[in-house]
Image (cartoon, rainbow, N blue to C red):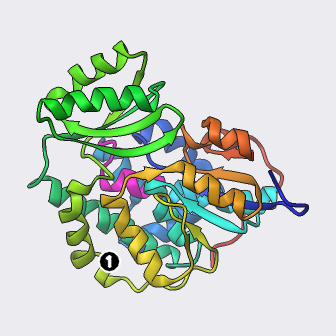
Amino acid sequence: MTTDQARSAVVFPGMGPSRFTDVGKFMMIDPFVRGRLAAADEALGRSVLDGFRTQAVDFGEFAQVAFFINSVALADRAVETQGLSPDLCVGFSFGQKAATAFSGALPFAEATRLTYELALCEQRFFEQEHQDLVTLTLTRVPEAALAEVLGELTERGEFHEVSGHLDEGMHMVTMREQILESFQRRISAVGGYSLYSMKPPAHCRILTGLRARVEEEVLARFDLADPSLPVVADHDGSLVTSAEQMRTLLLDTFDHPVRWHPVVDTLRAQGVGAVSVTGPDRLIHRLDVTTRHFDVVALGPEQALRPTRTAPRKEQ
């Protein structure tokens, strides 16, 4: 599994539903988060915590910025308290924003503004387009069974796209919200289980319009640098080492399905034996394909609240 001198990687997880009631206390008392919050508030000219507390929207712009801050701050904590010094970096789905900051492709303040502006751009887009689509994450569905169920949708002329392959039997599928319940019943009939659905949808070819809008309205205003830490692309496992590749990766997330197995393959090929998943993660550190191949350290808000003797690093 590893070379004689095993290498390590930091993984920033994708974003699930994020609520102030779940992480607000952690954000107010954790010194690593508080340092990053101060920098984010200055970058945006407003209080992230106040916006997060009052917005009450799982994927609103302040929820997204808060998730980004928590992920970067938890990586700070891993560096200071666990000696994390990764050789590679992975940003899975939404985790790309944290990877952009941690890898040095953008300064933290700029990455904060990018996260905020991307969220607002997406909101404007979905107020006009694809309001009827959702993305469902499901598990315990073998490839053959999934192909059968999706084939039935094709026969009925129902739109659908596979938005992700996460593990053996775990997938993401985008479809019309009107057929979500019947699709979930069909998944149950083949022995599968529906985990959660996301609206607006994510990671599918039908969102090329969103990609184009983000490129024109948001990314054009940010000057990315070559990442100082190689980033592994979350859709094909390729290594991202230049500013232009990083820009493309941030755009690819809109209209490319995420695939975790190629990421695992690349990490293994690079001699990685240990991964630290830093962020509020409910998925990546638990996947069989992750735990089977790596020594996994999960550092989320719950683990971070445990006492530590090491003082946080001061913000630069």
Across and down, in percent, residue 51 comes to 34, 53
Could one spot residue 46 in this view of the protein?
no
Across and down, in percent, residue 256 comes to 35, 58
Q: What is the three-letter code of the residue carrying label 1?
A: Leu
- Could you classify mark 1 by the number of other residues whose Cα lies within 10 Å: few (under 14), some (14-19), or many (20 or more)? some
Which residue is depicted at the point 62% across and 52% down? 264
| Depth check, front residue: 92 or 187 | 187
- Would you say 34 lies left or right of 56 here? right
Q: What quarter of the picture does the C terminus occupy?
A: bottom right
| Depth check, front residue: 181 or 31 | 181
Which residue is depicted at the point 42% across and 37% down? 171
- Would you say 276 lies left or right of 188 here? right
Above or below 112: residue 267: above
| Depth check, front residue: 195 or 16 | 195
Instruction: Give the extent of the magenta segment.
Output: 57-68
Which residue is depicted at the point 60% across and 49% down? 29
Above or below 230: residue 62: above
Which residue is depicted at the point 59% across and 73% down? 103
Q: Which residue is under mark 1?
A: 219
